[in-house]
């Protein structure tokens, strides 16, 4: 019903204008929500793709590893960054004297205090399948063939003085199996490695490791730039 002042049409117009404005606001809110979730989805997809790319690169191509410690002095220095190839180890062979990134049996760190992650070490391969390892008078030896000659290489002369766990008991010659490798640090008297084996404290034993425990082949030091060099 229209009053004497004709306010009914005016009120209807105000209501329609209010409804229109509310509708526009709701549409803008919906658009912003849609844009927000679209951006979230794009970020999630980008993150997943990035993680997959990193995983593929590190699993099949190469890794950048930081040296932590002094077990490879003076070949490698603490804090140096290494370029490590993965493909040649995963699909090829591991040669004697190669410097590699590896991990040991039952050695883990916990990410965020919860998630177990393998601890990586940089070492030199001194024994390959078919080589013989033995310890006599607390000194570890590796025996192998080179240029038609049998070589009996003494890995350390006084490792017993520095043995990290227990005492280095002597043991009889052991022939490395087809998937066993013996690794040591170049800084022989400051390295926990395959020599820690068959002693009176087996909890921290390393001994021979399998090829699956060798992550990659160290090729170059790439950082600091002034220390850029090939690793042999």
Image (tube, grey):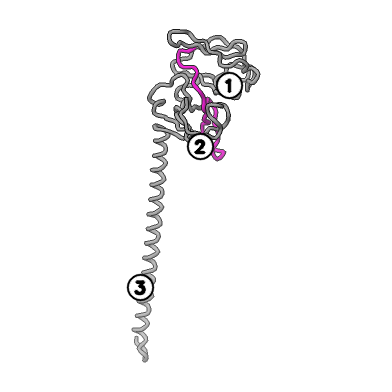
The kind of secondary structure element at disc 1 is helix
Query: Residue most toward the front?
Result: 226
Position of 84 relative to 137 (above/below): below
Regarding residue 86, the answer to whether it shows in the image is yes
Query: Which residue shows up at 45% across the image and 25% down it?
Result: 212
Image-quadrant location for residue 168:
top right
> Percent x, y for residue 76?
53, 29
Check residue 20 in the rendering and tell me which mark sits there, or answer none. 3
> Percent x, y for residue 201?
62, 20
- The residue identified by callout 2 is 224
* Span colored in magenta: 104-131
Residue in the foreground of this view, choosing between 205 and 97: 97
Rendered-image quadrant of the N terminus: bottom left
Position of 144 relative to 79 (above/below): above
Left or right, residue 5 beside residue 171: left
> Percent x, y for residue 19?
37, 73
Residue in the foreground of this view, choosing between 111 and 61: 61
Query: Residue most toward the bottom?
Result: 4
- The residue identified by callout 1 is 188
Position of 113 relative to 201 (above/below): below
The kind of secondary structure element at disc 2 is loop
The kind of secondary structure element at disc 3 is helix
């Amino acid at each position: 019903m229209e009053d004497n002042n004709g306010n009914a049409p005016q009120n209807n117009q105000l209501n329609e204008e209010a409804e229109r404005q509310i509708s526009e606001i709701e549409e803008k809110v919906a658009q912003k929500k849609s844009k927000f979730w679209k951006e979230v989805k794009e970020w999630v997809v980008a993150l997943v793709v990035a993680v997959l790319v990193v995983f593929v690169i590190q699993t099949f191509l190469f890794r950048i590893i930081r040296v932590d410690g002094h077990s490879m002095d003076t070949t490698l220095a603490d804090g140096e960054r290494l370029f490590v190839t993965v493909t040649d180890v995963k699909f090829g062979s591991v040669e004697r004297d190669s410097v590699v990134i590896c991990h040991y049996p039952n050695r883990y760190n916990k990410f965020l205090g919860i998630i177990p992650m393998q601890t990586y070490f940089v070492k030199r391969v001194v024994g390959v399948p078919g080589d013989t390892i033995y310890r006599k008078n607390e000194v570890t030896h590796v025996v192998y063939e080179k240029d038609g000659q049998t070589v009996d290489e003494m890995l350390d002369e006084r490792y017993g003085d520095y043995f990290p766990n227990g005492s280095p008991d002597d043991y009889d010659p052991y022939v490395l199996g087809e998937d066993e490798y013996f690794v040591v640090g170049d800084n022989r008297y400051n390295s926990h490695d395959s020599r820690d084996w068959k002693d009176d404290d087996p909890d921290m034993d390393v001994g021979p490791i399998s090829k699956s425990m060798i992550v990659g082949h160290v090729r170059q030091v790439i950082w600091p730039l002034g220390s850029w060099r090939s690793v042999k």
